[in-house]
Amino acid sequence: MATGFEAFVARRYLRAKRKEAVVSIVTVISVLGVAAGVMALVIALAVNNGFTTELEKNLLGASAHVDVLEKSTSNGIENWEALIVKLRALPHVVGVTPALFAPVFFQGPGLGAGGILKGIDVENEIHVTDTLNHLKTGSLQALNSADKPPALIMGSGLAHNTGMILNSRITVVSQGELTPVGPRINTRPFRVVGIFETGFPQYDDLRAFTTLKAAQQSLSLPDVVNEIEIRLDDQNLAPKMTKEVQKVLGPRLVATNWMEENRPLLNAFRMEKVVTFITIGLILFVAALNILISLVMMVMEKYRDIAVLMSMGARRNQIRKIFILQGVLIGITGTAIGLVVGYTLCYFADRYRWIPLDAQVYALTYVPFEPRAWDAAWVAAVAILISFLATIYPARNASRLAPTEVLRYE
């Protein structure tokens, strides 16, 4: 452990005299180098965390944590009501809802677009996904209306592409049963009772919701579904609960989860985080070289002082600690400056949305910044460790000086 003597001398050496201005300049550059590296790493990690969190929130807001699917295309999941009762009894399950997905063509009076029709149980759907909680216009309760034609809620992008507004009529074209001359085409009119906007083009531009019964009739299907969606009280339990759900299912069904479905995207974010750390870590490496150069120059300037201290009784271990403390003080100062500046910039950039984005490309309207306390802890630890490692060589050389050899010519 360093004593007050080593710390006092280390601080005095960092305040170089006028004739040692070069050493002082290199010291300042070293501090700024560490600060720049820490600041850049904090900002880069905050952006990565922000994008990951926002995209996960969008994905999980529009999809379930665990999905039950058919292993192969067939006539759908039969007896789904009894299966839902079993799934609701599992621990950590807070919502279960049936769903019927089908690719269809939406034909307006003058415009048309392809998309996905989803038949839902309205009461249970809102407890599993958040898509229908983002209505721009219309009413969710109107989806259960018994009026003819059946009700439909569309994504804002899909409504724009088909020219639909609230209470307008649209025709849903789908493939029906196979006949000897080919598949039968089903056409069914719907009434637009709502338009939602999640900010996620994957859903806003393609999805439309109707009741499960209306979807089954439109697709000429019996009382079947092709997916059962499950929401958990903790999204991170999805892999574990997928195994529990699979035990309840029969041989024709399989359980999957949001992590498996979005594995490429999540892996891309993890890899980006690693690459970001390696790339910006080079800045810290350069700062460590500056610290090394600064201390080597300091040792060369302080040969006489070191010899005097050793002749007055300073031990070699104390001399070594003096120069180690100098490098660590540079690292701590630079790290503190980098953390303060980095977190301040992240706060204001996120609060005032300094960097806008095209939502059609990035699914977000601005660059989100999410600095985390854990990131500050390990970034600071790495920066100080690198600063410490840079002191080992010059501190070792300083402690090996022979006082008699240095003072002989004084």
Image (spheres, rainbow, N blue to C red):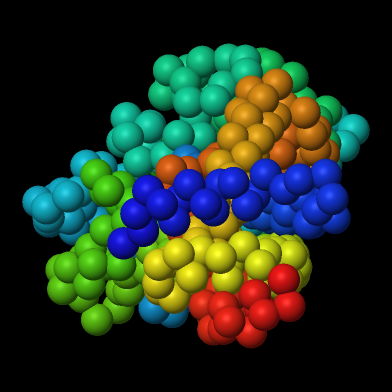
Viewed as shown, does residue 394 lie left or right of 77?
right
- Residue 218: image x %, image y %? 55, 46
Residue at 47% x, 21% y is 140
Quadrant placement of the N terminus: bottom left
Q: Nearer the viewer, residue 147 or 157?
A: 157
- Residue 45: image x %, image y %? 60, 52
Viewed as shown, does residue 236 lie left or right of 15?
left
Residue at 67% x, 54% y is 34
How many numbered marks, from 0 up?
A: 0
Residue at 67% x, 25% y is 348
In the displayed structure, 290 sits above or below 6; it is below
In the displayed structure, 155 sits above or below 332; it is above
> Which image quarter: residue 251?
bottom left
In the displayed structure, 347 sits above or below 53; it is above
Quadrant placement of the C terminus: bottom right
Q: Would residue 354 be seen by someone viewing this image from the given angle? A: yes
- Residue 133: image x %, image y %? 48, 26
Q: Would residue 157 be seen by someone viewing this image from the given angle? A: no
Residue at 40% x, 67% y is 313
Viewed as shown, does residue 19 lie left or right of 351?
right
- Residue 155: image x %, image y %? 66, 34
Q: Nearer the viewer, residue 289 or 310?
A: 310
> Which image quarter: residue 129?
top left
Q: Nearer the viewer, residue 48 or 341?
A: 341
